[in-house]
Image: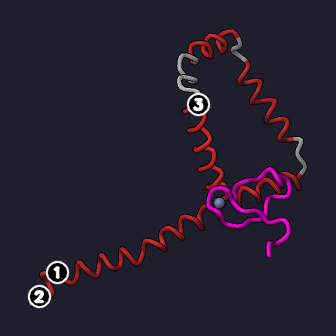
Amino acid sequence: MMMAGKKRCQCCGRMFVPDRRVGARQRACSAACRKIRKGESNKRFRGKNPGYWRGRYDMVKAWRKEHPDYQREWRQRRKEQRMKLSAGEIQAEMFSKALDAVQENVLVLREIQAEMPFQLADIAGCFAVSPCRSA
Ligand SMILES: [Zn+2]
């Protein structure tokens, strides 16, 4: 039986509870899976639109020369918008980021844990043929 509100991650296939702020739009269980999905999406886009990014920097460079203060002002506006967030919203944001970081670390730890038996076998193999133990 499927639990209410749970979804299957489109990247790793595990079940997860979507962040309530994202809801039905969330497709990946963690930041790591989201990053993988985004990479695949970018790859598809590049495949469908070869040369999309070529020759654009000259246009961007010219535009930036005409609008020298744009980025500084954009950063300032963004900073001010973030200052408007309530303490609760900032905490929720920080908690969400911390949770993502923990999930990423868990993935890395699981990979390390999965590798350990093989490395132990390698080490055991090294000792088995060690010249020090032949005497
Ligand atoms: Zn996943």
Cα distance between the residues tagged 3 and 2: 61 Å
Within the image, what quadrant is residue 85 found in?
top right
Question: Is there a contact, CB below 8 Å, between mark 3 and mark 2?
Answer: no
Question: Is there a contact, CB below 8 Å, between mark 1 and mark 2?
Answer: yes
Please name which of the two marks, 3 or 2, marks the residue nearer to the observer: 3
Q: Position of residue 47 (x, y in %)?
A: 55, 33
Residue sitting at x 62%, y 41%: 41
**Residue to which mark 2 is pinned:** 134
Earlier in the chain: of badge 3 and badge 1, it is 3
Cα distance between the residues tagged 1 and 2: 7 Å
Look at label 1 and name its amino acid: Ser
Q: Give the residues in magenta.
A: 1-30
Q: Which mark is residue 130?
A: 1
- On screen, residue 15 above or below 92: below
Q: Which mark is residue 48?
A: 3
Name the side, left or right, on which 31 lies relative to 24. Answer: left
